[in-house]
Image (cartoon, rainbow, N blue to C red):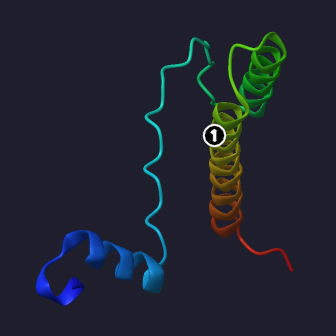
Amino acid sequence: MALEGNLPAARLVYERTCGRTAEAPAEAEPVDLVMPRMRTAVDCSLALERIVDAICKGTIDRDTATTLIAAIEVSELEQRLGELEQTAATSELRPEES
């Protein structure tokens, strides 16, 4: 029947062989949370404190908090990488000590 163009039958065959298709993720809703510009480690710590406060107050859910924390981690890693690159660049410019 599926080969004859019966779409429900084709869907059944597809789902049985390949599995059900994943549900589309829900649209993200805006969050009423003021975050600092994350330029330093102190800014990242402040942002984490604000997220914890929002979780405790119930203004953001766990999934939103997880996403925000991941973004802060990326920002902090980017800052550390920039510092390492600067350190490497300045050590390459210094003459070698014997």
The image shows residue 28, relative to residue 4, as above or below, that is above
The image shows residue 28, relative to residue 5, as above or below, that is above
The image shows residue 60, relative to residue 65, as above or below, that is above
Tell me where residue 16 appears, x and y as whole percent: 46, 81
Q: Is residue 73 left or right of residue 15?
A: right
- Say few, some or many: other residues with alpha carbon within 10 Å of mark 1 (under 14 / 14 to 19 / 20 or more): few
Is 68 in front, or is 72? 68
Q: What is the quadrant of the N terminus in the image?
A: bottom left
Residue ID for mark 1: 67
SS at mark 1?
Answer: helix
Count every numbered label the image shows and give the total.
1
Farthest front residue in view? 1
Q: What is the quadrant of the C terminus in the image?
A: bottom right
- Residue 38 sits in quarter: top right
Q: Give me the residue at 76% from left, 14% from top.
A: 58
Q: Give me the residue at 57% from left, 11% from top.
A: 32
Q: Is residue 96 left or right of residue 63?
A: right
Q: Give me the residue at 62% from left, 62% from top.
A: 89
Is 33 in front, or is 40? 33
Is 34 in front, or is 27? 27
Tell me where residue 31 appears, x and y as whole percent: 55, 18
Q: Amino acid at mark 1?
A: Thr
- Residue 62 sits in quarter: top right
The image shows residue 76, relative to residue 17, as above or below, that is above
Q: Is residue 61 left or right of residue 37?
A: right
Tell me where residue 54 appears, x and y as whole percent: 75, 15
